[in-house]
Image (cartoon, helix red, strand yellow):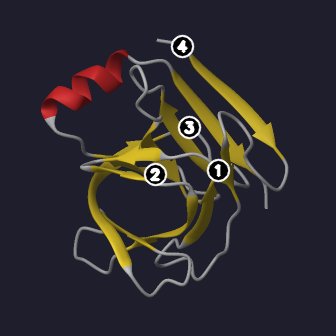
Amino acid sequence: MRVKKIAIVASLVLSGLMAGTVRASEEDQAIRVSFSQPVQIPGRVLPAGTYYFVIMNTSDRKTVRITDEDGTRTIAVVQTINRERWQGTSGTEFTLAEGRGVEPEAIVAWFYPGRTTGHEFVYPAQEEKQLAMAKKDTQISGD
C-alpha cells in the first residue's frame, strides 16, 4: 500500500477534490469542504458540492455530522474511531482510498488542523477490507 502526501496552499486539488477550512470552533472541529467530484462515505456517496463536517457533542466525540453547504440539513451521521499521526499540520488533512472501477474515491479519515488525533470513518467489514487494499492518497490544505 502506497501513501503519498501532497501539500497545496489554500486548497486541495488532487483527484478532483478541493477543500478549504472554516473554523467554527476548536471544540466541534467544523470544516467546510468542497468536492468537485463525488466521494464515498460509509453507506452513501456524496455528490460533488460543499459540505460541513462537524464533530457532534457526544460523550465519546467520535460521531461526525455532515451537513449541506448552509449547515441546515443533515446529509449523514458517521461513526468514527480515533486515528493517530506523529504531528499535526497547519491545514485540514484527508486520506482517500481509490475507488474500485467506476466508484468514486472513499474518505478514509480526516484530521482537523493542528491535531494529532483524527477521525477514521467506520465502514462495513467487506468495504473495510477493500479499502485496506486500495491505493491511498493523503491530501493537506493550508489555511
Residue closest to the eye, 80 or 49: 49
Q: Which mark is residue 3?
A: none
Callout 4, which amino acid?
Arg
Circle 3 is placed at which residue position? 86
How much space separates mark 4 and mark 3, taking CA atoms? 18 Å
How much space separates mark 2 and mark 4, taking CA atoms? 21 Å
Residue 22 picture location, percent across and down: 67, 74
For label 2, the crowd category at 10 Å Cα-Cα, with few meaning under 14, some 14 to 19 and many 20 or more, is: some
Numbered disc 4: secondary structure = loop
Kindly identify the residue that appears in the image at 24 percent across and 30 percent down: 128
Residue closest to the eye, 29 or 21: 21
Q: Nearer the viewer, mark 4 or mark 3?
A: 4
Please tell me whether residue 2 is drawn above or below residue 143 in the rendered image: above
Q: Nearer the viewer, mark 1 or mark 4?
A: 1
Numbered disc 3: secondary structure = loop
Q: Quadrant of the C terminus?
A: bottom right
- Residue 48 appears left or right of 63: right
How much space separates mark 2 and mark 3, taking CA atoms? 9 Å
Q: Which mark is residue 117?
A: 2
Residue sitting farthest toward the right = 9
Numbered disc 2: secondary structure = strand
Please tell me whether residue 122 is drawn above or below residue 29 in the rendered image: above
- Residue 45 appears left or right of 7: left
Please tell me whether residue 95 is drawn above or below residue 90 in the rendered image: above
Q: Are marks 2 and 4 in contact (CB under 8 Å)?
A: no
Q: Nearer the viewer, mark 1 or mark 2?
A: 1
Residue 89 picture location, percent across and down: 69, 49
Q: Earlier in the sequence, mark 1 or mark 2?
A: 1
Q: Which mark is residue 36?
A: 1
Q: Which mark is residue 2?
A: 4
